[in-house]
Amino acid sequence: MAFANKAFANMTFANNDIPNNDTRFGTALVAVASTAVLVWFGTGLYPKWPLLWFAPLPVLLFASRNSAWRTALVAASSWLAGSLNLWHYLSVVGVPPTARIAICTIPALVFAVAVLLFRALLRRGAWWSALLAFPAMWVSVEYLFDLVSPHGTGGNLSYSQLNFLPVLQLASVTGPWGISFLLLLFPAALAVGLHLRNSAPQQAMRIVGVGLGVIAVALVFGAVRLAMPASGQKVRVGLIASDEPANVNVADEGSETARLFRQYAAEAESLAARGAQVIVLPEKLGVTVDPDTKETDALFQSLADKTNSKIVVGLVHVSPPVKYNRALIYAPEAPRQTYDKHHMLPPFESKLKPGTELTFLHELSGTWGVAICKDMDFTALSRQYGNAGAGLMLVPAWDFVLDRWSHGHMAVMRGVEDGFSIARAAKQGYLTVSDDRGRILAETRSDSAPFVTLIADVPVGHDTTLYLLLGDWFAWVALAILLFTLVQLCRLPSRPPIVSRTTANS
C-alpha cells in the first residue's frame, strides 16, 4: 500500500518531472487500476454517478509526466478494462464476439487519443487548450457516432448521470453533449491544476476555478429548474406488462395472439375502472396479418368505447410481404391510429420496415405523441415531437432484463431535452412514468407479478427548451473547440520536460 501511495503521489509531481525507473511501473499500474475500477462502476448497466467524474483523473496525471507511448498504453488499457463491465450483457443478448470486442475497444482508443491530445497541449504550455481539448475530443466523437450509428446515443457518458437530477437538467440546454463535456472537464481541470500547482500556482488556481465555476453554474441552473412547479394539466396513465414465459415472446399469429390480447384487455379494463385515461401496452405482443385484423380491432376498439380510455397496443403487423413493428392507438368513438417504429434494433429487427411518420393525439390536456422503445435512443426523433408541442410520450417497449435500468431510463433524458413527460411500458424491463425534469413519478418491474400494472398521474404541459430551439449547438461548439486545439497543437513547439534536481542527480 505504501508503494501504491508513493506511485500515485509521483503522478502529481509538479513541472513534468520524469519518474524514476523503479516507480514508473508502479505509477502506470495505479493509474490503470484506479481508472478501470472507476469506469467499471461509473458506467454500464447500473452506473454509480459520482465515480465517472473522477475516472479519467489518474490517467491524466500519469500523462502529464510520461512519454506518449506509455500514456497511450495506460489510457487505452484502463478504459478497456473498465468497459468490460458490458461483456457479459453483450454476450447474453447475442452480440457476436467481434462486435463485443469493437464495442469495448473503440471507446478505449478514443479515450487514449483524447488523453494524448491533452498531454501534447500540456507539454506545449497550452494549458487552457489542454483543459478544453480533452472533453471536446470525446464529445465530438460521441456526436459523430450518434449521426451514423444504428444505436444513436447508446454508450453516451451522459447516461451515467440520470440519477444526478441537477446535472441532468443541462440536457434541456445542450442535449446529452453538455453533460458529457462537464463530466470530463472536471478531471481535466484538476489534472491541469495539479500539474501547475508549484510552477504556476496562480494559473493553476484560475484554471481550476474556471472549471469548477462552470460546473457550479450548471448545478445552480439545475437546482432552480427542479424547483420550478410542473406546468400543465395532469393525466392519469396506466401501464401493463407480463413477463410470464407464455407471454414474454412475440405470440404466434392466430389463437396465441388472440389469447394474449384478451388477457391484456382484461387488465386494461381494470385500469380504466381506476381512472386511467390512457393505457400503454408493451412492444411486439403478438402478430396480426392483413386482412385478418378485425378481431384485434373489435376487441380494443370496443374496450376504448366502453371505458372512454385511449389504448396503445404494440404488435408485429404483417401486410404481405412487408412487416412492421407497430403501435395501434384506439380512442373512444374515433378511427384507429397507427405508428410504425422508426429505429430498428439490428440484427433482430432487420427484416421489419422502418416507419417515417409521427403520430399525435390532440387532447384537451395537450398534445400526446407515440414512439416505440429504441426510437427514444435518438435525439432527432424526440426533438421532432418536442417541436410539435408534445407534452406526453406514450412508449411501448421491450428490454433485455439485464438492461432494464440503463436502457429503460435512456428515454428519461429525451423528456428533459424536449420538454415532455413519458409513459413507457416494457416487457422484461420497467413500467416507468417520468416528467419533463427527469423525475421518476412511478415505476415497477415488469416481472413483479404475472400481469404487472401501474397507474400514475403525470403532467402534460409542454416545456419549450433551449435544446429544442437550437438543437445540437453544443456538439458543434465541441467540434469547433477540437479544431481550434488541433491548430494550437500544430502551431506551438513542443517543450522539453523540466527535470528536477532530485531526478537529475539520481
Image (cartoon, rainbow, N blue to C red):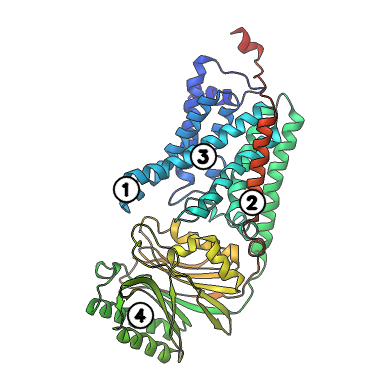
The answer to whether residue 194 shows anywhere in this view is no
**Does residue 2 sit above or below 506 in this rendering?**
below
Closer to the chain start, of discs 1 and 3, is 1
Residue under the image location 56 percent in, 34 percent down? 115
Q: Hey, what amino acid is under mark 4?
A: Glu
Local SS, label 2? helix
SS assignment at label 3: helix
The answer to whether the residue labelled 2 contacts the one labelled 1, judged by CB atoms less than 8 Å apart, is no
Question: In this figure, which residue is indicated by the disc labeled 1?
Answer: 96
What percent of the width, then of the height, locates residue 357? 49, 73
Q: Amino acid at mark 2?
A: Trp
Cα gap from disc 3 to disc 2, whole angstroms: 18 Å
- The image's mark for residue 110 is 3
Callouts 3 and 2 close, C-beta under 8 Å: no
User: Which amino acid type is marked by label 3?
Assistant: Val
Residue 10, relative to residue 165: is it above or below? above
**Badge number at residue 476:** 2
Residue sitting nearer the eye, 467 or 4:
467
Using the rendered view, name the quadrant where residue 403 is placed.
Answer: bottom left
Q: Which of the marked residues, 4 or 2, is nearer the chain's N terminus?
A: 4
**Residue of label 4:** 267
Q: CA distance from mark 1 to mark 3?
A: 22 Å
